[in-house]
Amino acid sequence: MEYLTQWLKSHNITEVECLVPDLTGVARGKIMPADKFTKDEGMRLPESIFIQTVTGDFPDDDRAVDPRDIDMMARPDEATIRMVPWAAEPTAQVIHDCYYKTGAPVEISPRHVLKRILGLYEARGWSPVVAPELEFFIVKKNIDSDYPLEPPIGRSGRPETARKPYSIDAVNEFDPLFEDVYDYCEAQDLNVDTLIHESGAAQMEINFLHGNALELADQVFLFKRTVREAALRHEIYATFMAKPMQNEPGSAMHIHQSVVDKDGNNIFTNADGSHSPLFLSYIAGLQKYMPAAMSFFAPNVNSYRRIARYTSAPINVQWGHDNRTVGLRVPESEPRGTRIENRVVGADANPYLALAATLACGYLGIEEGLTPREPCEADAYAYPYELPRTLEESLMHLDASEALKKILGERFCMAYSDVKNKEYATFFAVISSWEREHLLLNV
């Protein structure tokens, strides 16, 4: 706490936002005066924040948590302290880890789940290296949720009516917004790299510099808050929904991943630059376990609208070299930069859980010595669907995978399944406008 106290004083901080990422990726926690933050022994929060659904409900069966709804102790990770650049008063934000009064970590915390997987790699002397690519849409303010989303008005006074992938002028339409985004990111030490216009109307992509998986998960978590806040200040919305508009492509969070040993050597390559057996087993693990991990990559009912043929989103677990139709792409690179791009993950995924799940699948492949299929040299959309197509189906795959549940934590998987099954049941109870339009007077 001494470092945090000095940091707060040196930045003249008056308030601290104490953040805990929940299962859905929502920032929970408390805001407190800086002097109270430094004097407290830790922030207390009820364990039930980790079993709250995206609609604010709780599972009907609370088997995964203590029925007394006991308090957790949230302790700040001093490495995560940053300014809140949009705040009117000098304000800091810091991400917390959660523990029980015994000192044991809370197993159902997403940040703990990722740390658990990274610990397995560390035990082998390895460190995963990741680089997320995060897509999102900017849209007009949508006050009434019954109405579809629309592209916002740019500097020209007109909305986009056609797709403009990689268009510089289309990005420039929203220069004031992105200047704020970059300024906010710089103030928070978020290592964003390139900004491009994606294929959808007012759809953008930000690439992060490669690095440590926990640090990158923290950065994606904070970046989502940052973009939404910046957009609101320009009277528009930013959304990370996987499929926000019917006739536009979905938004992904592609995850580039490799693993280095203690000397910094990429374990995916042999001395002659060819693919190593570890690389092949890692891919095979992804192929075997990704269907069971799908609910972490596509965590919402809307997520599965993105997974469709010929929509720049994969439908199976084929792998291939420089092939964007497969779920597992190996980009062209120097041997030391050999990596795998998981193209299945949606932008709406919790970054901690998406990274934990993809790294867990690869680890299981190495642990089991699996062998992948031959790489796909053709159009992978010509192959059958291999990934679950609904949240309900994904959760059934997870429940049937003892190996994945064991590596991620059985209690965590139980809590996650309970939350997501409750969300699916809530969604399924809603009668859509499509049903009223086509079924009301016709069946």
Image (cartoon, grey):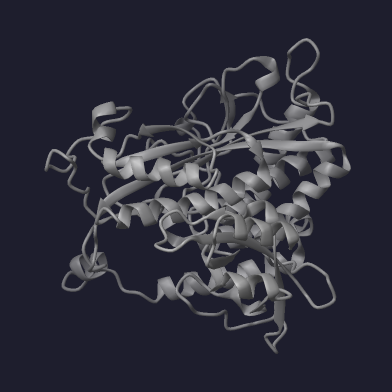
Q: Position of residue 383 (x, y in %)?
A: 50, 33
Residue at horizontal 78 percent and vertical 22 percent from the top? 276
| Quadrant, the C terminus | bottom left
Asked if residue 7 lies left or right of residue 302, the reply is: right
With respect to residue 438, does 431 lie above or below? below
Above/below status of 413 relative to 340 = below
**In this view, 36 is above or below 302:** below
Identify which residue, 193 or 59, lies in the foreground: 193
Q: Give the residue displayed 66% in from the left and 50% down from the top.
A: 357
Left or right of residue 318, residue 335 in this image: right
Residue at left offset 22%, top offset 71%: 436
Query: In the picture provided, is 247 more to the left or to the right than 399?
Result: left
The quadrant of the image that shows the N terminus is bottom right
| Percent position of residue 355, x then y | 63, 47
Q: Position of residue 165 (x, y in %)?
A: 31, 30
Q: In the rendered image, is residue 50 in sight? A: no
Horizontal side of 260 relative to 215 (left or right) equals right
**Figure disc tally:** 0
Quarter of the figure with residue 65: bottom right
Q: Residue furthest left?
A: 157
Residue at (78, 44) in percent of width and height: 364
* Nearest to the observer: residue 98 or residue 319: 98
Question: Relative to residue 96, is residue 277 depicted above or below?
Answer: above
Quadrant of the rendered image containing residue 167: top left
> Which residue extends farthest top?
272
Choose between 151 and 389: the one closer to the eye.
151
Q: Is residue 40 visible?
A: yes
